Image: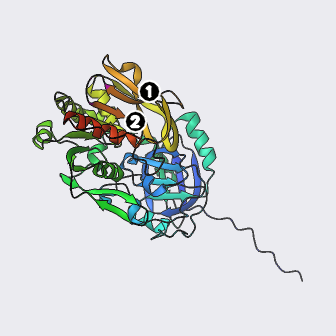
C-alpha cells in the first residue's frame, strides 16, 4: 500500500500591517508583541538600522527598510541615538523583507530580535517591501497598525478601526514626548576605531542645545569641536537659556508636525534671534527656525528617509550625499526677504537649508551628523563653530 502523503502545510501569519484603507499585509512577527498605530514610511539606507530605529525623529512612525537583509550585524550599546534609552524614543514599528538571522560582526553584543523586544518595537518580516515602497510612493505615507501575536490570532476588525481612526502626524506635537525631562551637560566626543568614544574635559566654548528629540552624534560632534554642551528641554524659555551665557545655540532634530511644536518653540526662538548669538538648527530645528522667521512648513507626499540623498550647497556650489529623515519640509516660496535658501534637494527641489542674511544664523533639513550615513556634511559643525570664533575674534577653522 502506498504511503500517505502529508497534507500541504501553510505557515500561519504571526504579524499584520493593516493600512487605514483596509489593506491587510501578512508576515512573520518578531520583536515586541502587541500593536502600534503610526505612519508608515520607507528608508533606503543600506546600513545603520539601529541608529535609524533609535532616532527620536521617527517617533510615531513605522519604518519599512528597502534593503532586504536587516539584522546581520546584530546590535550593540554604542550605536543607539536617542539620548535617554530607557524612554525608548524612536520608531514604534519596523518592517523587513528577509527573516532576521544570527549576527555576524565583531561589534555585535546581541540579536536584533531580542533588542527589538527590549525596545518595545513591533516588527514584521517576510513581505514584499518593494511593493510596499511603491504603494507609499504612489499614495503617500499611510496611517496603519502593525501587530504581532505569536499565536497568529488577531481581531482584524478592531485593527482596521484603529488604523482608520488615527488622525496622523499633522497637528501632532511629538517633541514634548521625546525631549529631556531636565537640563544636562554632554561631554562625550565622537567614536574612534577600536577606541570608542572620548570625553571633552577642556571645553573652549559653550553651546546650549534645545532638545526636540536630539541625536547623540550631533552632541558628540559639537563636543568634538571643543564645546561644553548643555542640553535643555524643548519648552525651556529664552530667559533661562540666555542666563546660561551660551556662545552658541543649537536647535535639534525631532519628530512630529513642526507647526504644532512651534506653538511654544517659535516664540522662544524669536526671542533668541534678538541677540547676536550664533544659532544653528538641524531637521525639526531647521523647520522651527523657518517658522520663527516667518516661513511655512508643509507635509510631504512620501518624505525623505535614507542615507543616499543628493543635496546642493549653494554657498559652495558643491553637491554632497547626505542622510535624511523628515516627513515635513519648509516651503521655500514662503521664506521672507532677508532669508537665503542655502541648500536644496536634488531629488525633488525641496528646501534643505536657510541662512539669515548678515546674521550668524543658519539651519539645514538633512542630518550632517550622519549616524547612519555619509560624512559629507560634517563641515556644517565647523561652520557653526567658526561663527562663534568670529564673534570672539578668533581665527576660523578649515571647513573641510
The quarter of the rendered structure image containing the C terminus is: top left
Magenta region: 356-360
Question: What secondary structure is marked by label 1?
Answer: loop
Find out whether residue 329 is within the magenta segment. Answer: no
The quarter of the rendered structure image containing the N terminus is: bottom right
Q: Position of residue 322 (x, y in %)?
A: 48, 41
Q: Is residue 352 visible?
A: yes
Query: How far apart in space, not on screen, are marks 1 and 2 (Cα)?
Result: 14 Å
Residue 144 lies left or right of residue 90; in this view the side is: right
The answer to which image quadrant residue 377 occupies is top left
Residue located at (43% from left, 55% from top): 51
Residue on which disc 1 sits: 314
Neighbour class for label 2 at 10 Å: few (<14), some, many (≥20)? Answer: many
Given this view, does label 1 or label 2 mark the residue nearer the observer? 1
Q: Position of residue 10 (x, y in %)?
A: 68, 65
Q: Is residue 125 positioned above or below 227 on the image?
A: below
Check if mark 1's residue and mark 2's residue have beta carbons within 8 Å: no
Residue located at (18% from left, 30% from top): 276
Q: What main secondary structure does the magenta stretch of the protein show?
A: loop
Q: Is residue 256 visible?
A: no
Kindly give the residue lying farthest to the front in the view shown. Answer: 395
Residue on which disc 2 sits: 365
Residue 110 lies left or right of residue 65; in this view the side is: left
Q: Position of residue 80 (x, y in %)?
A: 39, 58
Kindly give the residue lying farthest to the right in the view shown. Answer: 1
Q: Is residue 290 positioned above or below 220 on the image?
A: above
The answer to which image quadrant residue 28 occupies is bottom right
Nearest the viewer among 205 and 136 is: 205
Kindly give the residue lying farthest to the bottom in the view shown. Answer: 1
Q: Position of residue 39 (x, y in %)?
A: 45, 43
Find out whether residue 358 is within the magenta segment. Answer: yes
Residue located at (33% from left, 27% from top): 355
Amino acid at each position: 500500500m502506498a504511503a500517505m502523503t502529508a497534507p500541504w502545510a501553510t505557515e500561519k501569519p504571526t504579524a499584520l500591517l493593516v493600512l487605514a484603507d483596509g489593506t491587510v499585509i501578512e508576515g512573520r512577527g518578531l520583536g515586541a508583541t502587541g500593536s502600534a498605530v503610526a505612519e508608515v514610511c520607507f528608508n533606503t539606507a543600506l546600513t545603520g538600522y539601529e541608529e535609524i530605529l533609535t532616532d527620536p525623529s521617527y517617533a510615531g512612525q513605522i519604518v519599512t527598510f528597502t534593503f532586504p537583509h536587516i539584522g546581520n550585524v546584530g546590535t550593540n550599546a554604542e550605536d543607539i541615538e536617542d539620548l535617554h534609552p530607557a524612554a525608548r524614543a524612536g520608531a514604534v514599528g519596523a518592517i523587513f523583507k528577509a527573516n532576521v538571522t544570527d549576527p555576524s560582526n565583531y561589534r555585535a553584543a546581541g540579536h536584533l530580535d531580542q533588542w527589538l523586544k527590549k525596545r518595545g518595537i513591533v516588527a514584521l518580516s517576510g513581505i514584499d517591501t518593494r511593493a510596499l515602497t511603491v504603494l507609499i510612493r504612489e499614495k503617500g505615507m499611510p496611517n496603519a497598525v502593525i501587530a504581532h501575536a505569536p499565536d497568529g490570532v488577531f481581531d482584524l476588525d478592531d485593527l482596521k478601526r484603529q488604523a482608520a481612526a488615527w488622525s496622523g502626524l499633522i497637528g501632532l506635537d511629538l517633541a514634548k514626548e521625546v525631549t529631556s525631562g531636565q537640563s544636562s551637560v554632554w561631554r562625550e566626543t565622537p567614536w574612534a576605531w577600536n577606541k570608542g568614544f572620548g570625553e571633552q574635559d577642556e571645553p573652549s566654548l559653550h553651546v546650549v542645545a534645545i532638545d526636540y528629540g536630539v541625536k547623540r552624534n550631533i552632541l558628540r560632534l559639537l563636543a568634538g569641536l571643543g564645546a561644553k554642551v548643555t542640553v535643555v528641554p524643548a519648552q525651556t524659555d529664552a530667559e533661562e537659556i540666555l542666563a546660561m551665557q551660551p556662545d552658541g545655540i543649537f536647535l535639534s532634530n525631532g519628530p512630529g508636525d513642526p507647526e504644532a511644536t512651534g506653538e511654544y518653540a517659535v516664540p522662544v526662538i524669536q526671542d533668541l534671534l534678538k541677540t547676536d548669538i550664533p544659532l544653528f538648527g538641524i531637521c525639526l530645528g531647521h523647520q522651527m527656525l523657518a517658522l520663527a522667521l516667518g516661513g511655512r512648513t508643509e507635509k510631504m507626499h512620501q518624505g525623505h528617509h535614507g542615507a543616499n540623498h543628493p543635496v546642493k550647497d549653494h554657498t559652495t556650489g558643491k553637491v554632497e550625499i547626505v542622510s535624511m529623515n523628515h516627513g515635513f519640509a519648509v516651503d521655500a516660496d514662503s521664506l521672507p526677504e532677508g532669508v537665503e535658501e542655502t541648500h536644496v534637494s536634488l531629488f525633488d527641489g525641496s528646501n534643505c537649508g536657510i541662512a539669515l542674511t548678515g546674521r550668524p544664523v543658519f539651519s539645514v533639513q538633512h542630518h550632517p551628523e550622519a549616524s547612519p550615513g555619509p560624512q559629507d556634511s560634517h563641515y556644517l559643525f565647523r561652520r557653526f563653530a567658526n561663527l562663534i570664533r568670529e564673534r570672539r575674534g578668533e581665527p576660523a577653522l578649515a571647513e573641510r
